[in-house]
Image (tube, rainbow, N blue to C red):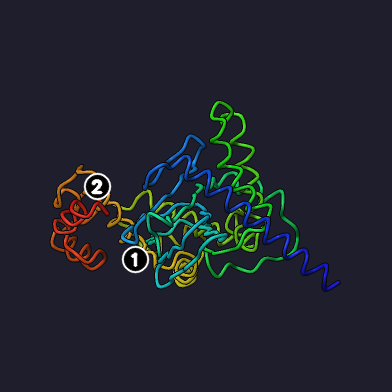
């Protein structure tokens, strides 16, 4: 029995390495230079990063990533997650995040893919997988897991769709649906099923976070959000921080600042207009908050970005 167990483990490791090698080959083929490459497969994005200077900040979405080569850190609230080849980040709730690569060089680039998750598909699959066993309230909304062979193969299968682009319209949706189902049956599956189950407290927090992301320029009270979620203000505040890493007010501030930075980088706004666009009523306060988060005031940060290309 022990020898059979060792053999199974060795075969699984071999299969994982083969999948990682296949995935690396496909990303290098379809991302021929350093950068971030959206693809024609809905929600699939390829990453080829060759420098540790790379930092990506975004306001959050339901998504998962699969690392094929290199390492990466993700900072969400007070949590820092570090993961590498064969591991996956699963964001079951949208939360403002910062990503940074580790040990990336042109000779040994960081290679990964990300997939946007569809809440309606998660909900449908979660309902099909539901059972009567009670599920504890999730302690987190973001997870690092090591996919089993089926889930790892599903990630690489999405990459392989790029080999026959004419068939993507036919093959992509079944492949994406399978990925959603396998995530719900993964080590973080119980928590994902709670978040994707209408009527649960986890789902109520997920919806509240989605509302803030859409209406970040508006004022709101935690009490009003809690009432809509059918929780007391104290319970809602605690549940929200547990899942997102931030209080509701901190969450809105991060979303505002990340969106303002995006507007400035795209040169759609100047500093004053960006501040008011995202909901600030004081440019001075906006600049102060911006510097506290990004380390430089807006104009200096923009110049640094232009000089370094990061």
Which structural element holds mark 2? Answer: helix
Badge 1 local density, few (<14 within 10 Å), some, or many (20+)? some
Which structural element holds mark 1? Answer: helix
Whichever of labels 1 and 2 marks the residue nearer the N terminus, that label is 1
Which label lies toward us, 1 or 2? Answer: 2
Q: Residue at x 55, y 57 (%)?
A: 203
Where on the picture, by quarter, is residue 296? bottom left
Where on the picture, by quarter, is residue 10? bottom right
Q: Residue at x 53, y 43 (%)?
A: 26
The extreme top residue here reads 166
Q: Residue at x 49, y 45 (%)?
A: 27
Q: Residue at x 64, y 63 (%)?
A: 187
The extreme right residue here reads 1
Quadrant containing the C terminus is bottom left
Q: Which mark is residue 263?
A: 2
Looking at the picture, tell me which residue is in the foreground, 35 or 214: 35
Q: Are marks 1 and 2 in contact (CB under 8 Å)?
A: no
Q: Is residue 2 above or below residue 102?
A: below
Q: Which residue is mark 1?
A: 250
Q: Position of residue 36 (x, y in %)?
A: 39, 46
- Real-space Cα distance between discs 1 and 2? 20 Å
Q: How many marks?
A: 2
Looking at the picture, tell me which residue is in the foreground, 213 or 154: 154
Q: Position of residue 90 (x, y in %)?
A: 53, 58
Could you tell whether 194 is left or right of 223 in the image?
A: right
Q: Which mark is residue 97?
A: none
Looking at the picture, tell me which residue is in the foreground, 18 or 170: 18
Could you tell whether 263 is left or right of 156 in the image?
A: left
Q: Position of residue 142 (x, y in %)?
A: 51, 63
Quadrant containing the N terminus is bottom right
């Amino acid at each position: 029995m022990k020898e059979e167990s060792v053999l199974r483990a060795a075969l699984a490791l071999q299969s994982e390495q083969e999948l990682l090698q296949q995935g690396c080959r496909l990303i290098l083929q379809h991302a021929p230079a350093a950068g971030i490459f959206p693809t024609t497969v809905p929600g699939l994005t390829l990453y080829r990063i060759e420098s540790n200077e790379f930092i990506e900040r975004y306001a959050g979405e339901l998504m998962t990533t699969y690392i094929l080569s290199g390492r990466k850190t993700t900072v969400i609230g007070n949590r820092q997650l570090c993961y590498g080849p064969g591991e996956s980040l699963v964001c079951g709730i949208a939360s403002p995040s910062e990503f940074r690569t580790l040990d990336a060089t042109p000779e040994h680039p960081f290679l990964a893919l990300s997939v946007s998750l569809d809440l309606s598909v998660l909900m449908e699959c979660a309902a099909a997988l539901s059972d009567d066993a009670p599920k504890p309230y999730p302690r987190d909304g973001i997870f690092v897991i090591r996919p089993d062979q089926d889930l790892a193969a599903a990630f690489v299968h999405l990459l392989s769709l790029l080999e026959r682009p004419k068939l993507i319209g036919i093959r992509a949706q079944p492949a994406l649906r399978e990925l959603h189902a396998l995530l719900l049956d993964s080590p973080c599956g119980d928590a994902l099923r709670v978040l994707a189950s209408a009527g649960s407290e986890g789902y109520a927090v997920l919806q509240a976070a989605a509302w803030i992301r859409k209406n970040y320029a508006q004022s709101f009270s935690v009490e009003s959000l809690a009432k809509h979620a059918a929780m007391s203000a104290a319970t809602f505040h605690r549940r929200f921080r547990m899942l997102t890493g931030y209080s509701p007010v901190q969450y809105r501030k991060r979303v505002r600042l990340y969106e303002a930075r995006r507007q400035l980088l795209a040169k759609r706004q100047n500093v004053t207009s960006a501040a008011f666009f995202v909901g600030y009523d004081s440019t001075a306060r906006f600049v102060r908050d911006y510097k506290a988060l990004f380390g430089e005031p807006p104009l200096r940060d923009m110049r640094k970005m232009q000089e370094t290309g990061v």
